[in-house]
Image (cartoon, rainbow, N blue to C red):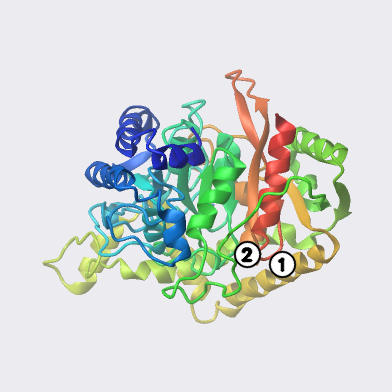
Amino acid sequence: MTARQIAESVKAGKISALEIAAQALELARTEGAELNAFITLCEDEALQIAEGIDNKVKAGGYGRSLKSREKGETDKTSELAGKPGGLLAGVPVAIKDNICYTGCRTTCGSKILENYIPPYNATVVEKLLEAGAVIIGKTNMDEFAMGSSSETSYFGPVKHPLDKKRSPGGSSGGSAAAVARGIIPLALGSETGGSVRQPASFCGLYGLKPTYGAVSRYGLVAYCSSSDVIAPFARDTEDLALIYRVIAGHDEHDATITSDLDGGNVGINVKKKFKIGIPKQYFAWELSCDVSPVINLAIEALENAGHEFVDISLPLTNKAIAAHYIIAPAEASSNLARYDGVRYGLREGGDKKLKDMYLRTRTEGFGSEVKRRIMLGTYALSAGYYDMYYERACKVREMIRREFIDAFKKVDLIITPTAPTPAFRLGEKLKDPLAMYLCDVFTVPSSLAGVPAVSVPFGAIENPESKINMPVGVQFIAPHLKEASLFQISAILEQLKK
Ligand code: GLN
């Protein structure tokens, strides 16, 4: 069932939120465990919340919703159940394990936070709960969201739902695998440079990276604060738009939230015709030939449906990876300084001198990719190198941002592959960081520019070894806060696929 169907049926009293939650938890314990998609299940909280929603429906809670909403009343019948409206009433969802939820530990896929229970909820968690969603668990991920394959997790790699020898992508691989396997209809991940779009492409899902500042980061464990954004996965466009509507919007706890946001209330108009740019640099990439046939089919289908395509140029595309892999480690090295054994998580050598405690805690608590980033980032920020690396990368970022602004003077949207390849084998790139970093070549530019983008599943490529068809995603990039255009083009392509 889609999230919309579940919410409507729950509100109409046709199905029970408790039964749905119990089913999702059962699937998570069996199929989810096979894929290593979850780090922790929040069973008791989920069942309790679901029961509260059923009680609210029985008490006529959602039936009165429209009227009470008009009168501006908020719901007081049950603290746990959704507020009037219940956009996600009884919908089971999962959230990436770097989003704080007091009902569960939040590990970020790291040993250093293995037993960390946050003292407050992320704003998106509050919004999900308000809308009646039932959070069933926390999903597996690359440690501190650093990676593109979900293999750097302290809790072991996530497996692709169609082929267990392959990666579901990353860093939000657990959320993607759980939605693709049908355990839940919706999940949240986070994006810094492609961590939702790339797994969406690998797993045949719809994945949105919202505009930087459209969704509150309060309660998202920081990796690279200037690019981080919470981002959803869904199995169709309407569900994607639905969860975006729930999580987007103003939050007094996050000063980077844009004030001119319309709350993400998007109507999907599939009649609209777009002018779409094809940036030649994204198609000249040597690896993109793997997926190009599928992207070309999408272009052809859209062209036949009356959309106009024009060639554009984004010459700085090949500088984005270099800029991201300076800026992200630099900010990470600063953000991760707080894990010192004093206030958070793991403490090793607490009986030793302070310096020895720092050393042991961080040596034992962080995995090798995280350590690599901390070292690279510290170097890029150090006296004498700051101008040469960090400051220069920030200038490149600003130029990339302007390049997008200029491109959007000519076109409504930009089309590109989401990732250069379909899902790759587990272990294939783990020993070669550069090969792993290059997976993000098509997603990092829009992350640096802060503009929104969506990955829409379209077609598949047969894997010659396994003979399994592996999904391929098409990426659309839109101007600042034009998520509505992304939902429209996504719905249009979804219809053309049928
Ligand atoms: N793969 C990129 C990185 O490791 C982006 C990750 C992300 O979007 N969180 O930095």
Q: Residue at x 52, y 61 (%)?
A: 248
Q: Which residue is mark 1?
A: 400
Q: Identify whether 495 is placed above or below 131.
A: above
Q: Identify whether 381 is placed above or below 70.
A: below
User: Between residues 373 and 16, which one lies in front from this camera angle?
Assistant: 16
Looking at the picture, how far across and down is residue 461, in whole percent? 67, 27
Q: Residues within 10 Å of mark 1 (few under 14, many from 20)?
A: many
Looking at the picture, how far across and down is residue 479, in whole percent? 71, 63
Does the closest atom of ligand 1 sit within 8 Å of the Cβ of label 1? Answer: no
Callout 2–callout 1 Cβ contact below 8 Å: yes
Residue 441 visible in image = no
Q: Residue at x 68, y 43 (%)?
A: 491
Q: Residues within 10 Å of mark 2 (few under 14, many from 20)?
A: many
Between discs 2 and 1, the one toward the N terminus: 1
The three-letter amino acid code for the residue at tag 2 is Leu
Q: Which residue is mark 2?
A: 448
Looking at the picture, how far across and down is residue 174, in whole percent? 43, 41
Q: Quadrant of the C terminus?
A: top right
